[in-house]
Image (cartoon, rainbow, N blue to C red):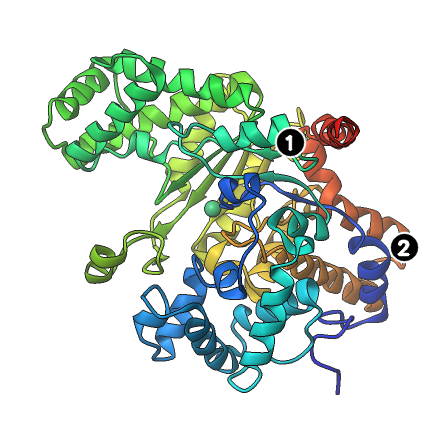
Amino acid sequence: MKKFLDENFLLQTKTAQQLYHEFAKQMPIIDYHCHLPQQQIAEDKQFENITQAWLYGDHYKWRAMRTNGVDEAYCTGAKNDWQKFEKWAETVPYTMRNPLYHWTHLELQRYFNVNEILNGSSARNIYDQTSSLLQTPDHSVRNLLRKMNVKVVCTTDDPIDSLEYHLQLKNEGFEIPILPAFRPDKAMDVASAPKFNAYVKSLEAVTNISISSFEDFLYALQNRHDFFASMGCGVSDHGLEEIYSDDFTGEEIESIFNKVHGGKELSLVEQRKFKSCMLLHFAEWDWEKGWVQQYHLGALRNNNSRMMQSLGADTGWDSIGDFSQGRALAKFLNKLDSDDKLAKTIIYNLNPADNELFATMIGNFNDGSVAGKVQWGSGWWFLDQKDGMTKQINALSNMGLISKFVGMLTDSRSFLSFPRHEYFRRIICNLFGEEVENGELPNDVKWIGKLIQDVCYNNAQQYFGWEDTIKQAQSSKFAATALK
Ligand SMILES: [Zn+2]
């Protein structure tokens, strides 16, 4: 019997072990999409205990605790940090076969050198041990990123965000570029007139542009897009149920904007037309600036209205939706491609039933101008686990080129979740290793090791064009040190 989570965790063959230990493991990390709070990086936050780092914003863990019958007071409620951690620790043995079980123990090992199994009886020890480490400068959030050999982080930001912390980090010469990503979901969400108009007001305030027409609205947003670019942003992101690609005319959009801006609610048809128009504008700006655009498609969000009312969004009431993705996605990408305005694009599906659809969709628009120009993103959210990643890697191998894949990202709100890159690397090394040993691939470990290193790091570095960004940030570190 193999030992639980030892150095050859998930690596079932000698070749897989060699691929991981000699090639994948050493590669740095580019986390091109996550939800880390940039303010905490700017402050170089020091957590007082592991509950703050692990449980404050993690709806994956809250869902598991609730399912285990733990009262909300221990998830998002008023119980103290130790009480919350104890309930989580008691839940962990019940999370076996959920990725949380692996992530939890990988994170304990990698950040804290804790090899014990977390459960009710080890809880106190592990809490004290990890918390005292988290209080040392060695475990400040910046050092947590350094520990994982992270080279770039992309946060997720609304167009009206000030990006003040990004600026602070840049001015300080932090050697890991913390770049913003432009996520304008709220700017196209016209489901509620009061909400949309409140957003327009904030946009006016931040841009100093008075908005009384659709043209003004676009101008103000584009102003923010330019500002993001000036802050080193090269990535946009959209979290949508589906791509909107309905037909519309300029006059229709103007009158839709005037209607909602005047406080009237829009019909579903009008909402879809507006969103279709906005998506095209955003995509054109991304193309003009040479950005990479990302589309996270298929989440059915905020399904529990009772819990939504008390806790708000992103607290664990979302699931996989069954939206129809293919036709509109193809129409949208085709429109951009036909106008010669298709930026580098990454599409992510949340419904695993769409895996092969997405794997084949990207091939429609890979025209040889850029390697892997249109990418199918890594298994995301509910699919970010061993089975989901394996299926994504296999479908992409079968229907595209896994060798040109830009690889894994954390998509996380936690500074402790970077071992997910390791998890992904072990899985892909295992898949290649098994096929080498079965005689399905040649025993050319050097070449396969190179392909794996590309997927782990090199492809992303090239695709996002971050080689110089990384080099400059590294040298500014030395400049900052020299100044002291
Ligand atoms: Zn995300």
Is the residue marked by circle 1 packed among few (<14), some (14-19), or many (20+) residues within 10 Å?
some
Q: What residue does disc 2 label?
A: 444
Q: Is residue 75 left or right of residue 333?
A: left
- Residue 270 place in picture, x, y as percent: 19, 29
- What residue is rendered at 88% in x and 56% in y? 445
Residue type (three-letter) at the residue carrying disc 2 = Asp
Q: Is residue 168 above or below residue 446?
A: above
Residue type (three-letter) at the residue carrying disc 1 = Phe
Q: Is mark 2 within 8 Å of ligand 1?
A: no
Quote the CA–CA distance across marks 2 and 1: 29 Å
Q: Is residue 59 above or below residue 464?
A: below
- What residue is rendered at 65% in x and 56% in y? 139
Q: Is residue 470 left or right of residue 350?
A: right
- What residue is rendered at 35% in x and 17% in y? 207
Q: Nearer the viewer, residue 394 or 271?
A: 271
Q: What residue does disc 1 label?
A: 464
Circle 2 or circle 1, nearest the eye: 1
Q: Nearer the viewer, residue 358 or 8?
A: 8
